[in-house]
Image (cartoon, rainbow, N blue to C red):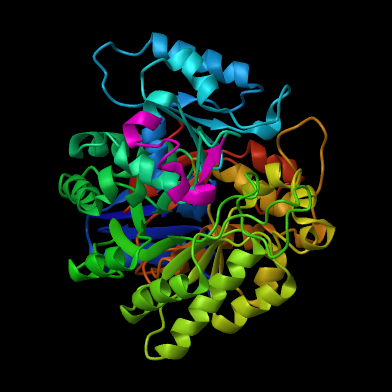
């Protein structure tokens, strides 16, 4: 099948041929990109039958690629109690009470809620605890997670189910909150929370497939044709076999439309080795689903004060965050993946976490110079310029989330201090230094809506709140740099720059139509009013707003 898409304002993001007014899609790839007269010559030479689609002068871009999110978590969260925007612990209780009331009597799964942020509470700016939950959840095992998903709270029934009590709490160290008498208060953090999430997961093969199909439609409405996603930790007991079976069966049935690059969360040496021994490797899969890296979590979040800083928090001298690995432990994990020619993407927010992550990558490169996987730092938020220079020297990618500054600009000076705050979230500096920086949202930590993400990068202004602020205007990106990070760089981050990321001959025909030309707006605010009209994957329409 050959289709001529004509009369478009096509921004190819291909620096060799940046603009076109039409392209030809043959099978599922761009067969020609350029002018209509030459396109017709191509069609005449290759086929007697073809279809035409009039792009009506709309701005056409390659499909967006979210380089780091949690797609299965987002899909699963559609079934959880939404605690986003709660302004108090009492409001959390009210939402949970309503959810309990509507819960089926024979439902044996855990009761879950997510999205609260204590920094927005108008009464007590504290984490909820087991006593708060027990008031409204009774004997139903319950877990609610902070918006960052690095802090969770269990009720008493849930603590009993996972065996968390005064006798067992000590083995988890700083990962468990304690009352003055040594009893756990229900607050759990980081790797312990991750283990609980996967232990209680109720996802079956059929449910997985159902929620993937539902979630991909929401992604298409935002112009996302590809996502790179950390999903293994949301399956029952880290069952990546089940996850890839779901992708494979959906693909074979023609129902998997979105392209998924799996960032496989594997935090232990034996787990990573088993993963490779079972035949999984970098690039395993096809152009709809594939392994793109091993994901490691080295610290927590800035909002929860669990991001690992070199110095103590400026607003809490009792802590400098949580490091999930010693330098020796992280070295072993990174080297193992490196030797198998598989990149690692290391979650590192604090400057201490970023430093030990770069040390581990440098160690692997020195001990095994024959392999050259594209290692990366996910988030890469609290930096000084020396750390960014090391990213350049080691050729390490940065997976960044511009939308994070909407909230973090309000806390970064308090948490990290004045000096570090002025060199953090330094995306323009990264790009100017030649660092490969791609855009993601960490959804559902933030919504995967694409225009707010672009706006945050270009304007460096908050979207929420009544007072308009600008954070480090010297780090603003141009609209070209922002879109490049959402398309070209996203493809490079997953090692797929040869098959997607630009509207170019031979690449997969994934593209979107917008109702505004992002390159010709009167103000940055117009970005927020720009909408996706249509989304195409493999040259086929998968979403329309019409």
Q: Which residues are magenta?
A: 159-178
Q: Is residue 64 visible?
A: no
Which residue appears at 61% of the width and 47% of the height? Answer: 453
Q: Is residue 90 left or right of residue 82?
A: right
Nearer the observer, 501 or 46: 501
Q: x, y (%) of residue 505?
A: 38, 69
Q: Is residue 51 left or right of residue 380?
A: left
Is 163 magenta? The answer is: yes
Nearer the observer, 546 or 284: 284
Which residue appears at 38% of the width and 61% of the height? Answer: 267
Nearer the observer, 389 or 481: 389
Nearer the observer, 71 or 355: 355
| Quarter of the N terminus within the rendering | bottom left
Is 500 magenta? The answer is: no
Q: Is residue 47 left or right of residue 497?
A: left
Q: x, y (%) of residue 285?
A: 24, 62
Tell me where residue 419 sits by quadrant: bottom right
Q: x, y (%) of residue 299?
A: 55, 57
| Quarter of the C terminus within the rendering | top left
Which residue is situated farthest in the top direction here?
101
Q: Is residue 405 visible?
A: yes
Q: In the rendered view, would you say 432 is above or below 24?
A: below
> How many circles with numbers are drawn on the protein?
0
Q: x, y (%) of residue 186?
A: 49, 32
């Amino acid at each position: 099948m050959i289709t001529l898409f004509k009369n478009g304002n096509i921004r190819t993001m291909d620096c060799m041929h940046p603009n076109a007014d039409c392209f030809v899609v043959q099978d599922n790839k761009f067969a020609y990109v350029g002018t209509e007269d030459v396109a017709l010559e191509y069609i005449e030479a290759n086929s007697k039958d073809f279809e035409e689609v009039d792009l009506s002068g709309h701005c056409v871009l390659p499909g967006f690629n979210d380089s780091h999110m949690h797609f299965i978590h987002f899909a699963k969260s559609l079934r959880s109690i939404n605690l986003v925007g709660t302004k108090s612990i009492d409001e959390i209780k009210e939402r949970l009470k309503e959810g309990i009331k509507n819960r089926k009597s024979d439902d044996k799964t855990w009761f879950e809620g997510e999205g609260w942020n204590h920094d927005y509470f108008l009464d007590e700016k504290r984490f909820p605890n087991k006593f708060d939950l027990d008031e409204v959840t009774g004997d139903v095992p319950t877990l609610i997670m902070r918006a960052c998903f690095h802090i969770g709270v269990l009720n008493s029934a849930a603590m009993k189910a996972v065996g968390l009590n005064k006798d067992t709490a000590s083995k988890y160290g700083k990962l468990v909150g304690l009352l003055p008498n040594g009893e756990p208060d229900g607050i759990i953090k980081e790797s312990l929370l991750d283990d609980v999430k996967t232990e209680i997961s109720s996802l079956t093969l059929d449910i997985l497939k159902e929620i993937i199909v539902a979630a991909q439609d929401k992604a298409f409405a935002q112009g996302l044709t590809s996502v790179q996603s950390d999903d293994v930790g949301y399956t029952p007991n880290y069952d990546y076999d089940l996850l890839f079976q779901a992708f494979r069966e959906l693909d074979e049935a023609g129902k998997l439309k979105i392209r998924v690059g799996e960032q496989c969360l594997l935090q232990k040496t034996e787990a990573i080795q088993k993963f490779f021994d079972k035949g999984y490797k970098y690039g395993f899969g096809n152009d709809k689903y594939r392994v793109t890296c091993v994901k490691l979590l080295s610290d927590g979040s800035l909002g929860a004060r669990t991001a690992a800083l070199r110095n103590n928090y400026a607003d809490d001298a009792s802590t400098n965050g949580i490091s999930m690995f010693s330098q020796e432990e992280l070295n072993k994990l990174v080297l193992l993946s490196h030797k198998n020619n598989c990149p690692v993407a290391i979650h590192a927010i604090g400057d201490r976490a970023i430093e030990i992550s770069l040390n581990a990558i440098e160690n692997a490169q020195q001990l095994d110079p024959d392999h050259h996987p594209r290692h990366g730092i996910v988030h890469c938020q609290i930096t000084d310029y020396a750390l960014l220079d090391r990213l350049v020297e080691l050729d390490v990618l940065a997976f960044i989330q511009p939308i994070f500054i909407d909230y973090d600009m309000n806390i970064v000076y308090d948490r990290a201090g004045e000096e570090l705050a002025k060199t953090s979230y330094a995306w323009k500096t990264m790009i100017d230094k030649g660092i490969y920086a791609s855009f993601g949202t960490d959804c559902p930590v933030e919504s995967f809506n694409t225009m707010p993400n672009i706006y945050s990068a270009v304007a460096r202004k908050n979207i929420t709140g009544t007072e308009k602020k600008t954070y480090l205007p010297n780090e603003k990106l141009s609209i070209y740099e922002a879109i490049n990070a959402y398309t070209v760089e996203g493809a490079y981050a997953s090692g797929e720059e040869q098959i997607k990321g630009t509207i170019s001959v031979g690449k997969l025909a994934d593209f979107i139509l917008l109702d505004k030309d992002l390159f010709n707006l009167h103000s940055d605010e117009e970005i927020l009013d720009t909408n996706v009209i249509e989304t195409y994957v493999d040259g086929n329409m998968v979403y329309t707003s019409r």
